[in-house]
Structure formats: C-alpha cells, structure tokens
Image (tube, rainbow, N blue to C red):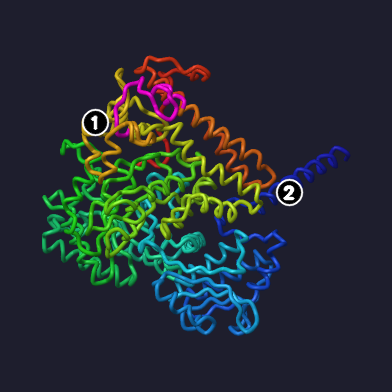
Amino acid sequence: MKKLLSMVWVCIMSLTALYANASSIVTGEDGYRLWLKYDPIQNQGILPEYKKWLVNWHVEGNSKTSQIIRDELDYAFNGLLQASNPTVLNSANLVVATAKTASQFLPEVNQQLSQLGDEGYVIRQMRYNNKPVVLVAANTDIGALYGTFALLRLVQTESDLSHINVATAPKTKVRVLNHWDNPDRHVERGFAGESIWDWHKLPDYKYQKYTDYARANASIGINGTVLNNVNADPIMLTPAYLEKVKALADLFRPYGLKVYLSIKFNSPATLGGLKNSDPLNPDVQVWWDKKVAEIYQLIPDFGGFLVKANSEGQPGPGDYGRTHAQGANMLADALKPHGGIVMWRAFVYANEKNEERSKQAYSEFKPLDGKFRENVMVQVKNGPIDFQPREPISPLFGATKQTPMMMEFQITMEYLGFSTHFVYLGPMYEEVLKTDTYAKGKGSTVGKVVAGEVYDYPITGMAGVSNIGSDRNWTGHIILQSNWYVFGRMAWDYNISAEQVAEEWTRMTLSNKPAVVKKVTEMMMLSHEATVNYMTPLGLHHIMGTGHHYGPGPWVDDLGRADWNPVYYHRAAKDGIGFDRSPSGVNAVEQYFSPLKEQLADPKTTPEKYLLWFHHLPWDYKVESSGRTLWNEIVHRYYLGVEQVAQINQSWDSLKGQIDPLQFKQVQMANTIHLKEAIWWRNACVLYFQTFSNQPIPEGLEKPKGTLEAYKAMQFPFAPGQGE
C-alpha cells in the first residue's frame, strides 16, 4: 500500500508540475500578437489622463470598416485601459468620424482633410462642450481605420496626447507585400514555415490568421498584398483558384487591403491553348481582356498584376522579340478600364548581352522611359545586384522622368541569415531612401524619387518581399517582426527614422520600461552594421553559398555562368580584391548622376562601405578611416562583426526577467545560433581571402579555428527557402 501511495504521489506531483508548466506556456507571449498586444498600461502617471480622454468613445458610420474600428477600440481599450465604453456621439471623449461629422467638432478639420486624400487622417486633442475630446478624422472609413491604429500606437507607446495634432497622408500610393508563396505552400526564400495561405482549404475555410494578417497590415498602412510567387504558377488564374483569391479579397477589403496576383506571362498559351503568348498577337490581347474581366467580376477592387518576365528562365515578351514596355502595356490596357495596375519587375539579367550584371537593369529600362502606359510601374530592387546585406542604390532611381520606379525591398532574410540572425533592416532601408541620386540636383533622394516628388509620376509605390509564414510568431524570429513593421512605416513616410521606428516597435511588442526600450533599440540599430561586418565588409557582395544562399561561399567557381559565382564579384587575387566598376573597369559608375558618379569613380572619395563594390584594390592599399592596410581592415571588420553580435547577445541576456519569458527564450535561442554562424562566416572568409593576400592575421586577433578545406566541404541539402 505504501508503495502504491508513493507511486500515486509521484504521479500527482508530476501532473502538477506538467500543468504548471503548461499554464506558463499557454499564458506566455509567443509572438502571435505581433505589435498589437494591448496589454494593460503600467504607467500610473499617464493612465488617468488616457481614461479621461479615451474610455468613452464613439465611431461614426455603418460600413464593415466602421464596425472593425469599433471592435478594435473595444478590444484595445479593454486591454490597455481595462475599460471600454462605447457611447453616443455627444457623450464621447474620443470620436472617430469622417469629414462631415468631424467638422461639427472642429470646423477647420475639413481644410486639413482636403489635403490628405482617401487614406490620410487627422488626430487632434481639443475641448468641446467644456470637456476634453480626441478626434480622429478622415475622408473615408479606411482613412479613419488608419487613424485609429495610429492613435492606438500612441497609447501603446505611452505618448502624451494632451496637445496631439497630427495630420498625415501616405507618401506612396501603392504599399504592398510581395509573397513568394507557391500553391503547394512552399515559400521561396521563406524561413518561417509554410505559406499562411492554405489554398487547399480555401475558399470555405478561412483561418483567424488571415484576419489578423489584415489587421497587422492596416495598423502600419500597408494597402496591398501580392498573394503568390513572382515565379508564378499559371494555376492561379484558373476559375477554381480565382474563387479562392476572391475569398481572401472579401476578407481583406474592409481593412483597405487589395489583392494582387503574380502572373506567368505565357498563360495564354499554357492555359488558353493559344499558339503563343506574343503581346502583339490580337488573340493574346483578347485572352487577357477576358481573363481580367473574369477577375474583376469576382473581385471588383482587384489591384492588378506583378510580373517577372525574361528573368531567370521566366517567359516574357523577349521570347517574341518584343520589349518589356510592349509586354507591360498589353496587360496595362486590359487592366485600365477596371482601375488595375501593372508592377513590372526590373530584375533582369542575361549573360548573352556580354554586359556586367549590375549595369543590365539600367541598360534595359532607361531607353524605355516614356514608353510605358500610365498605369505601369517598374519595380526596382534597392540595389543593382540582388538584395545584398549592403548595396549602393540602383542607378535606375531618378533615371526615368516619365516611368515610375517602384521600390522593392526584401523583408525576408534570403542573404541575411534566414530566421536566426538578429538583424533589424530599418537602418538599411533608411540608408537607401536618404541616398541622394542628384537626378534634379542636390536633394533628389531615393525616397523623393519613389514618392513622385522629383518627377510627377502618375502612380507611386513601394513593395516588400514578405518574411511571413505559418510559424506562430509569423516571421520565425520575434525581432524580425520589426522588419515587416518598419517596411510599412517607411512605405507610408520615407522620412521617418529607423531609430524612432525601432523604439516604438519595442514599446509595442516587448516592453515600455525605459531601460528595456533603450537597450533593445541600441541592439536593433547596431544589428545591420554588425551583419555587414561579419558577412560582406567594405563593399564585398554576393559571396553566399550556392543556391540556398546559406552561409559563406566565396570560393564557389563552378556554376553555369560567370555571374552566378561569388568569385565573379570579389575578384580576389594576389594583386588585391574588389570589382572595378570605375571608368578603368566596366564603368558602372557612368550610370549615376554627377557628382555621385565622380565620387564613386575614385577610391579616395568612394564611401568605404562601397569601396570594394566599385574598386579592385591592392592588399596593401591604405584605408583612410583607420590607417590600416586593406587586408588588415577586412580582417578587423570580420572580427568586429562577431564582437558586435556577442555584444548584442550579452545585452539581450541582461534583460532576463524584464521581457516575457517566451519572447526572451525564443530570441535567446536564435542568438546562440547567430553567434555561431557569425564566427563561421568570419573564419571561412578570412581563411579563404588569406590564400590570396598571403598575409598573417593582424596582431591581437585570434587565429580562425578550423580549416578552409573543412568549411568548403560543408553542405546543406535541405536548407529552407530554396526555389523550386
């Protein structure tokens, strides 16, 4: 009996421990709520004022969007303020309304709103009938939704609302996520699980995650989503799949989120049975007219098409001797009667043209300026190669006076450590958007070009290649949620600083404690530079492993064409390292405006961060900022990157007990991988480049562990996110 009782007691204690542990898991923050956590405000200094202004609220309107605003406010204030009281208009301290009602409170608001379009909004704190009132006003209910989320952001970050006076509208019209998701749920260059779109269960089964996806995008002003991969499967245009797309479009519409589709250019032949897909073939044009009409019959606000053509094996107008403009214009003509647009990617390169890869997009699209329809944007990657950790700007920005250049940033981490490296991309986006093109003299920044402020483009846009997947925390790494977030904030306003966004994201997602906010913001702002240092310092680029792009592979030299090989880009040899794109080399600098091209033509005036991008320099070249030789500087940068990652890890570890334990542990586990892989990058690259420099590791730095042969022998056959 005693033995039996003892066994029972052990079982009871084990179950107690299990349930205690399960309870902590269930109640912990696993990252699903993103930055929309709405946990109770702990700041007792500001809480009474918030309750005075916000608890009694009223939302005007009867649309689905108006109801969404009501639901969001009720959910948010019950969480943030522990109180929510929807009330009638005259009793409210918070009013969300469109212009007619808003003007009853504040007559001059109509003047402000007249400048803000369909998506802009005003947030004002004032007194009305001898009581404090916060007014959120817009011309449309979608604008009111954006304004509501902006107000909630201010509350979540514990901002002072006593003199709030905000009037803002998006700088770019089309702000979209590009999902590289396939119908089988594989995500090309995706590192956060499968695609969130379960095409097999659609159109009838709609996950809660679809709604929360729309909420999250609306909260940062993203107004479009391209549902499928640019390497498109034509099945997406079949009637069965269009019904599935319609189900998502109907769900997203009240959140201001339009759906777009990537299309296969040869669909008229593969789907329609035509002899070809020549854009000048009348039968092909009719096929597209009918297909577009079919789509709009199902989805009246369909956004349009994203097209990857004549690139990396994809079909396009070039197959028939036609130009990109002729291909894009055929689709634009079909879409125009319905209000749709074409986003035509400029990512094209072909070795048969015998032109250096970084120059090819400019050479292809600059001569076509003025030949595209007004509802076409050319979608350009931020740099001239391919989403590298750091690149100079694409010379196409500012080069086309009549053709809108749409920015394409990569949010997913294809070349940046997948989903285990702590890398906040805000500083990179900011660096690009604030770079001066000099297209119309000083001050013609990339941000202004994209926003149509340098040339008066009929349409403007910014796209981000999504890092979202089926993982509970959406992005595979909680910190990487910030890259989705900062993309939306900068697409709305390119002037916002990366540091401001990092701070507000931290407050909304992790903690409002000043010490935590300061430390996490510092980590985030350091992280991108650290990554560049341990991967591709001083302008090195495209030295990742073959195909999967996982880890270092600067030695790769056995692929089918020269510009697929890392050795093509770094040109390491006994005489030095770097790619000569100056006038003495391939003269890629000629594609930029003066004085930028003259600056980049001379290694003494080229910013050091781009030094080896534009110049092949001897190993004993003196680097001005440090006085070191080029070899010593490269090695020091690689070691500095590892030290910076270690610093980030130590800072994160110091926050134990100040951040939700599930959030803390997720990031801590990823940080362990991050540091190991930063060391791998450093050791492999330094050992490889040392075979050309024939110089010792600088004094004071430990010798890299392992052998170059061992690093070269590493293989990763199941690395995630590879193309299919």
Using the image, determine if residue 684 lies above or below residue 8: above
Q: List x then y, in percent, for residue 605.
A: 33, 35
The N terminus - image quarter: top right
Give left or right: position of 77 versus 328. right
Q: Position of residue 71 (x, y in %)?
A: 56, 71
Give, as a three-letter code, the residue at label 2: Ala
Secondary structure mostly taken by the magenta-highlighted segment of the chain: loop
Q: Which residues are magenta?
A: 613-636
The alpha-carbon separation of the residues under discs 1 and 2 comes to: 59 Å
Crowd tier of the residue under label 2, counting other residues whose Cα lies within 10 Å: few below 14, some 14–19, many 20 or above? few
Three-letter code, disc 1 = Ala
* Most foreground residue, 583 or 458: 583
The residue identified by callout 1 is 562
- In the rendering, which numbered label is found on residue 241? none
Residue at coordinates 35% horizontally, 40% vertically from top-left? 391
Q: Report helix, strand or loop for mark 1.
A: helix
Return the mark for residue 20.
2
On the image, which quarter does residue 129 sit in?
A: bottom right
Tell me where residue 296 appears, x and y as whole percent. 29, 70
